[in-house]
Image (spheres, rainbow, N blue to C red):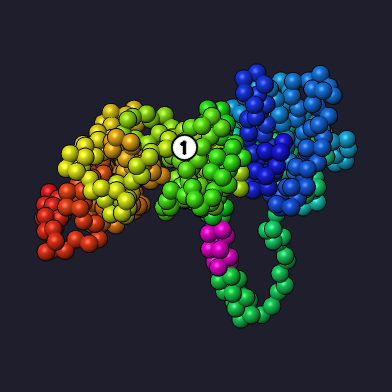
Amino acid sequence: MDIVTPLIARQRYAAVVNGTGTASVYAFGECMKDLSPNDCNLCFAQCKTQVLKCLPFQLATRGGRVFYDGCYLRYDDYDFFNESLSSQDRTVCGSKDFGGNNTVFGANAIELVRNLSVQAVKNDGFFVGSVTFSKGNVSVHGLAQCWEFVNGSACENCLENAVSRIASCTQKEEGRVLNAGCYLRYSTQRFYNNSGPDPVPGNGGDNKLAVILATSAVALLLVFSLVAFFVRRKLLQKRRERKQLGALQVAVNKSKLNFSYETLEKATNYFHESNKLGQGGSGSVYKGTLPGGEAVAVKRLFYNTTQWVDHFFNEVNLISGINHKNLVKLLGCSITGPESLLVYEFVPNQSLLDNLFVRQDVEPLSWEVRYKIILSTAEGLAYLHEESKLRIIHRDIKLSNILLDEEFTAKIADFGLVRLFPEDITHISATLAGTLGYMAPEYVVRGKLTEKADVYSFGVVVIEVVCRKRINLFTQNSCSILQTVILLTWNI
């Protein structure tokens, strides 16, 4: 639970695995999406207190679940992260009977929760709403939510099941269904947080005043609609990011890639400056030594941006399964600490940029070594483009992303900008990303991305290696072949 708590505070949900083999414990917690951060933390604190009653040393149970109206916490000894329904699901009806027409009330309650369930599937697993009937005297309010680890089809199935089960409660003023993958509730009392304005009756007036008021109302409505549109789009974007990160978190916890933050912190001597190997656009890299003595490189990612989510997802989800002698191997990651960390094999001779232009304590690279570096880089690119199961475009081939091992064999690094390239299309349109000077003109001008963008970048690297001059220092007098290559490439 100590691992779950900071994740709940940071992102309002958590899916973690602790231990190995038969001693593994799986835990998941999430707050309702209408809850404020402070209320979320308070609710989860109550959940933790209650779930202790389920622990094996107090009660002979395999796992435990705690449902509050604001949050949910579960732990078990098996992987339940893909589970939307289970034998432990419950329907909880209120204690107070509805005092009016039960038939009308039941029909309206069922219609409400059914509509909420449909809308929740379309809106990232969450929706609230209400319906008023009996000439405005009675209202029913409802909330539908799927947990972060539940995908679209499983969310739909879970909520459909909840709707059918909650029908048994419609003689009561409220009802809840507590499923493994979702939560559904209705009540005659408004129980969710919603900042939307309630309708206010207007007063009459003369025609001129009515026209002015109507025009003003339309203008205000337009402004509020635009604001609401952009706010909603931002919220949906954040929810998508949380969903992606949640899927990644589950994948990491189930894999062998998971490192504890404390282990990596100690391995790098608490990210001491003396262990710093370099810094790029996505984070700083430190040398570390694991408890077994293995040297590793630990990238400390800059946090809290959309780019961070994409970068981390690419590195872990796409590249972790790739193994080639000319690609830097990803050993694992940590997402449980104050910042996220990526762990790579340690490549001792630093980058090609360091060896060509930065370090003063090394001999100039011989022609034989330069040829070896160029050839091994080409082999790594050929693997990404043609030989791997996934056709991958790197998008950021440059001197600093080519590392050299103890034998000066090149290894391509930094896969944060990679894109998958389907076999059945000629190009994809992509947001411009990469390093100026290395990006192909057709990609810069037209936004058309193909594997040729990597080939162009590789060509620039070859010229830099051969001429031993930086791309941003080329002039017509120093190495005019560069301009020739660029023009020929563009014309083709």
Q: Please, what secondary structure does the residue beneath circle 1 have?
A: strand
The residue that disc 1 covers is 296
* Residue 224 magenta-highlighted: yes
Decide: is 397 above or below 421: below
**Residue at image location 49% in from the left, 50% down from the top:** 274
Q: Position of residue 376 (x, y in %)?
A: 25, 35
Decide: is 126 above or below 229: above
The prevailing secondary structure element of the residues shown in magenta is helix
Magenta stretch: give its range. 221-231
What amino acid is at disc 1? Val
User: In the image shown, does 255 or 138 lie closer to the viewer?
Assistant: 255
**Residue at image location 74% in from the left, 24% down from the top:** 63
Displayed quadrant of residue 188 = top right
User: In the image shown, does 333 or 295 lie closer to the viewer?
Assistant: 295
Q: Position of residue 66 (x, y in %)?
A: 77, 33
Is residue 378 at least partly visible in the picture?
no
In the picture provided, is 403 more to the left or to the right than 472?
right
In the picture provided, is 459 more to the left or to the right than 192?
left
**Residue at image location 57% in from the left, 52% down from the top:** 235
Is residue 62 at least partly visible in the picture?
yes
Q: Position of residue 82 (x, y in %)?
A: 59, 27
Q: In the picture, which quadrant includes the N terminus?
A: top right
Decide: is 208 above or below 152: below
In the picture provided, is 65 more to the left or to the right than 427?
right
User: In the image shown, does 68 or 157 lie closer to the viewer?
Assistant: 68
